[in-house]
Every structure is written in C-alpha cells, then in structure tokens.
Amino acid sequence: MLHVSGDKVDKERVSACLRTLQSTSPSYLLLASLDAARAQLSDKKDTVFNNALDLAIKARTSITNIPGISLLGRSSFSNSTAIDPLRLTVGARELGLSGFEADERLYANQGIVTELVESNSITLTINLGTCEEHIQRLVSGLKQLSSEVSFPILPKASARMSVKADAFTDISVRLTPREVFFAKKRRVDIRDSVGQVSGELICPYPPGVPLLIPGEVITHEALDYLELVVRQGGSITGASDPELSSILVCI
C-alpha cells in the first residue's frame, strides 16, 4: 500500500513507475488484509494503539533500570522531533555482548524473537498483539542477561562500534552494477581482494544491509567488519562462497 499526498509528487509518474513493477494479478488475500487494517485504523484511530503504547512505556521504564542494558531514546537524536515509541532498541555494550549474542541468549532463555539484530544492538517491536506477559518476559530476559554477565567490559564493545563505522566510510564505486554484470570475473582469496572491485553483493545478516555492492572497491575495513559479523554469529548473504574465504572480483 503506497500513500501519496500533497502536490510535490507527480502522482501520474508514480503510477506509471508502479505499473512497470507491479503484477496484473495481485494477491487478493493481501489486499483484503490491507483493507481490514485500514478499516481498523479508520474506525478506532484514537484508541487502537492505546494499550500498545501503555505497554511500551512500561517496558521502557523497566528496561532503563536494568544494570548494563541501554535503551535508545529521544536524547540520542538531538535533531529529531520524535522516535517510534513502539520500537525498543536495546544494547548490551556494557556487558560486552554483541547484538548477535544478546539475541541468541534472549531466544534461548525466554523464547524472545527480535525484529532486528545489529552488531551492537537489538530492536524489538510492540504491536496490537503484544500483551502484559510478553513485556514481563522481555524484562525478565534482559535482567537475566545483566545478572549472567560481569560488567563493565566497555572497551570490547567500543572496538566493535569502531570497526562497523570504519566499514561504511570512504566508499568508492568504480563500475555500475550493469558494467559488473557483463564484466569478466575471477575468484580470489578474501584477503587478496583489498583494492579490487567486487563482482558480487556481500550483505551481512542480520540486519541485511549490503556492505559491498557490485562495482564497489573492497577495503580492509569492510573485510574486518565481515569477519567480525561471522565471529559474532551472523551470516553473510549474497556471497557465492558462503564461507567467505573467497570472493568474485572484476578483472
């Protein structure tokens, strides 16, 4: 469902672009689900999220009191007017835990499934189906993390953040994806690929954000981050070599 309002967007052009991508046989089950959700929001727009918001406030209050656990809030964004109150981004940096490690422990200990996992944080979503028991289980799981791990071990976590930040700076692209598609390629050892042009998409998962795209120059920082993701329990998607011991580069 695409929402368009105002006069800044050419609606006819948007429609023309959509027609090149959309199927002529849409899923009517999906359309019915979207319409039901729209109707629910229309009929109860002032109250439909009240319970979820109350639970989110309760969760935030409890989480901020857990030693070694951090919670992303408005104070982290000086130029932002608001953040989504139903999304809880939690970090365990002071416990020396990566997002991957925290995610695994929460699932093993409490059966909690996170929405998003990154190297230094996890994100959970509160929705219309969330109940009091879910919040209690989340808070209990985070308290268990705090009690199981000695802290502070901040330098280790800070080093991880530095590795990630370095991987996404000084990006250089030499070829377009189309040029890469038709280019000749060869496979090289991953550590011999620095300075060469990536011939494939390399995407750490979670969170599923590409680190190297076809045509991008491979850097030491990018490889360091990929190795860090694998060590912490993440996986790499898009790579022709799932072990990431080698990579395709353009000749």
Image: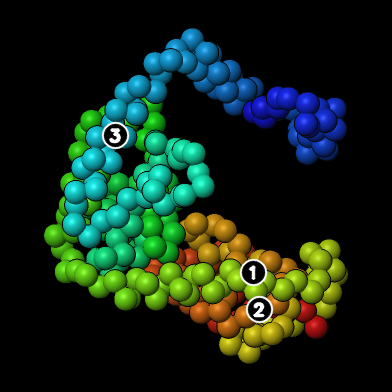
Viewer-proximal residue, 178 or 164? 164
Q: Residue at x 65, y 85 (%)?
A: 193
Name above or below for residue 94 compared with residue 1: below
Q: Amino acid at mark 1?
A: Leu
Residue at x-position 38% and y-position 26%:
128
Q: Secondary structure at mark 2?
A: loop
Q: Is residue 181 left or right of 57 when viewed as pictured?
A: right
Proximity of marks 3 and 2: CB atoms separated by less than 8 Å? no
Relative image position of residue 188 (x, y in whole percent): 66, 86
- Please indicate, yes or no, whether residue 240 appears anywhere in the rendered image: no
In front here: 67 or 236? 67
Residue 63, position in %: x, y? 24, 46
Look at the image and name its color scheme: rainbow
In the displayed image of the protein, which residue is found farthest to the bottom? 192
Name the residue beneath numbered marker 3: 57
User: In the picture shown, does residue 152 fall above or below 30?
Assistant: below
The residue carrying mark 2 is 218
Q: In what element is the residue under mark 1?
A: loop
Quadrant in which the C terminus appears: bottom right
How many other residues sit within 10 Å of disc 1, few (<14), some (14-19) or many (≥20)? Answer: many
Q: Residue flagged by tag 2: what amino acid is it?
A: Ile
206 or 241: nearer the viewer? 206
- Does dot 3 land on a helix, a strand or a loop? helix
Label drawn at residue 212: 1
Q: Is residue 183 above or below residue 44?
A: below
Asked if marks 1 and 2 touch (Cβ < 8 Å), the reply is yes
* Mark earlier in primary sequence (1, 2): 1
Q: Please, what is the three-letter code of the amino acid marked with disc 3?
A: Ile
Residue 215 falls left or right of residue 230: right
Q: Which is more N-terminal, label 2 or label 3?
A: 3
Tell me, yes or no, if residue 120 can be seen here: yes
